[in-house]
Amino acid sequence: MARAPERPDLRLVPPALAVWLLTWHGWRAPAGVLLGLAAVLALAVPVLLVRRVSPSSRVVAAVCACTAAAAVVTGLHGAARSSGPLAELAPQEASVAVEGTLTADPRRAVRAQAGGRPLVVVRLRVERLEARGEVHRLRAPALLLSSDQDWLGLLPSQRVRAEGRLRPAEKGDDVAVVVSGRGPPEVLAPPSAVHRVAGRLRAGLQEAVAPLPPAERGLLPGLVLGDTSRLDDDVREDLRTVGLTHLTAVSGTNVSIVVGAVLLLAVHTGLPLRWRPVVAGLALGGFVVLARPDPSVLRAAVMGAVGLLALATGTRRAALPALCTAVLVLLLVDPDLAGAPGFALSVLATAGLLVLAPPWTRAMSRRLPLPLAAAVAVPAAAQAACGPVVVALSDGLGVLTVPANLLAAPAVAPATVAGVLAAVAHPVLPLLAQGLAWLGWAPTAWLVLVGRVGADVPGATVPWPDGVPGSLLLAAVTALVLPALTRPRLRTGLLAATTGVVVSSAGVHLAAPAWPPAGWVAVACDVGQGDALVLSAAPGAAVVVDAGPDPAAVDGCLRRLGVDRVPALVLSHLHADHAAGLSGVLRGRRVGVVVTGPVDEPEEQRDRLDEAAARAGVPVERPGLGEVRAAGRVRWQVLGPARAYRGTRSDPNNASLVLRAEVAGVRLLLTGDVEPEAQRDLLERGVDVRADVLKTPHHGSAHQSPEFLQAVGARLALTSVGADNTYGHPSELTLAVLSARGAASLRTDVHGDVAVVVRGGRLLAVPRRGGAEPPGPAQAGPAASAAVRPAPPAAPRWSRGRYRQAGRAASRAPPP
């Protein structure tokens, strides 16, 4: 007779949820209110337990006791941040000098300053503050943002001094203040011995993986230690698209693999039972230090400690109470974890594995072999639990998450074990470490392949509302769908509904106009707030002018156009919105040459360009003024710059390469980000700037020379600009000047990719998606007038949600 499935022990779930909710939103209430609430709840506990105790009264008493403790911790936490010198000086943006201890590895911000060096994000505990001639002693968490790259070489536990300007943290942020740093750090004390050892091991792993191919070289340290400092942008985007980003965040999976491997070794070596928890505990502690104590690692460590305690005492405790215990301990120690996305995803994924995976495995095992049923149920359960939080952080819903995780699962453990062994072996035997890294290469390469192939599948991500509405909607859909997985009749209905959605979606896809349109000569790619223009040189080949700010965006545009050969990639200048997407153009394509302008600013972007080009074996050249080049049916000439610019509003912008290109008889003027000074220089030198198509300078900003725009006389103006950008691009005045000359005007934030097409002697602009009607066609010129073909209705565009986390402060840096 089969034993009935064991029911999970849910008694600690209400206290854990109550504490999580209060620590997450308790900062909104005054400290006095929270302390008063704690007193009331504390008095209620003995009342509930004074008489005959029932299971329900125990649970209510536990909720009251834990919530009272959380109220005290949150109240004191909030009071410490809302008073004192930081609270007084931050609103005034005072200049200060701070001394403190680093609490995490400094890292580059995901979003760099436009046109500047990338920001470095530093977490530190401020212990001494000098401001306005006074010295204050305190102990407060802070986030320091600096463009000085010297911060990247520091380790946690180092004591430093830095100068900067205070800025208030946002409500709900897990820091007391934000410091805009000036200059390099002054190191006051070396890191602790433990962190020095950990730093050497992490650096050793980076050296061990150095001979690996670039994609695997960046991913393997992420799998092992969460170190994504060298993770390729394309790999990062692929993993995000198919729902595998959790692989690069150290979590319970990593801890389970490491501790499990140690225990397996202990069993095979005959280690006595009583010593196994000790050895596993040492391995757990060492791994936590090595991986750094971020929220997910802390949660996994506490869970592992609870499990090791159970093993040592010989008692069997349910896994769900262990998870709840971990949540309670961590939140009471550090209430800031309540709002950390990594903490939420880690806890929810573990809860899904404990609650949903077992019954789903049993249900599927009736028709599938047990290992296959478990392999399908585990990622599906984790995704079901994490889905509402994931969509709150993104602007789409991944539909390939479960199959991608299913394919990735066999490779995670071998890669993790090989990487950990390589890190440990490197200080003693570097050659052995490299050999172990190559052992980890094969499973890591498989993960890269899964991400790359999955990301290329059409519809891998579907639009979905973000923020709280999207999270609630997905939670509701999940709640409706889950019963269907275990009930035959509901399962049949779900299958029928899914089939209907697939068939209708396929019909819409087949009925949609083909892209790219026949006869296209140029396409302005929708890459957000940046430029990327593609000139058709031959079937499958194109000259690309600028690469935009996002490798995934420009790569996607080129894939849609079927471009696998790029005879020349021209970067008008090196600002991030024109050059940061370089790796997206290089990815999987044969690139003949990279052509750059005369100014190597910013230096960081120039270094990245040289490194990427060298890795791909592509030469980098500078063209001369007036130089003419050709590739296939594309011919272009360099019109500017003719001189160096000093003291203008933006010297790098004015030093942009200006090209006049001709494709299939269509003349295009490509202007980079030139501003009035460079535009007037072209006119004063008598350069022929007339063109059929104008790539609007500087995303249509207000800084234009009307005489220049009129002299071009374009019948079609393409403005590459990001939706909802904070720069005010494009300017209504600039668009009005273009319209007054009769130019049909299209912009990528409204129309998406825009193709320039020649059909029957007519110049057409074909947008990939619909939007606001552009101005009417020009009536000037001997050739047929420009026209705009209507596009299919646009898919809904959802704004990306903003979740409070430390790194987001980098995006608040002012633009240059």
Image: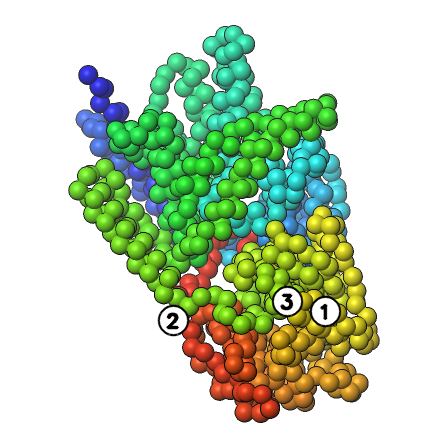
Near-viewer residue (379 or 586): 586
Q: Position of residue 62 (x, y in %)?
A: 31, 33
Whichever of labels 3 and 1 marks the residue nearer the N terminus, that label is: 3
Q: Residues within 10 Å of mark 3 (few under 14, many from 20)?
A: many
Q: Quadrant of residue 715?
A: bottom right
Q: Nearer the viewer, mark 2 or mark 1?
A: 1
Q: Residue at x 52, y 81 (%)?
A: 760
Q: Residue at x 41, y 46 (%)?
A: 400
Q: Residues within 10 Å of mark 1 (few under 14, many from 20)?
A: some
Marks 2/1 in contact by CB < 8 Å: the verdict is no
User: How far is disc 3 from disc 1 in space, using C-alphas?
Assistant: 9 Å
The residue where tag 3 is placed is 537
Near-viewer residue (547 or 668): 668
Q: Quadrant of the N terminus?
A: top left
Could you tell me which secondary element the residue under label 2 belongs to? loop
Q: Residue at x 57, y 47 (%)?
A: 235
Outermost residue on the front side: it is 760
The residue where tag 2 is placed is 793
Marks 3/1 in contact by CB < 8 Å: the verdict is no
Q: Is residue 734 visible?
A: yes
Q: Position of residue 74 (x, y in %)?
A: 44, 45
The amino acid marked with disc number 2 is Pro
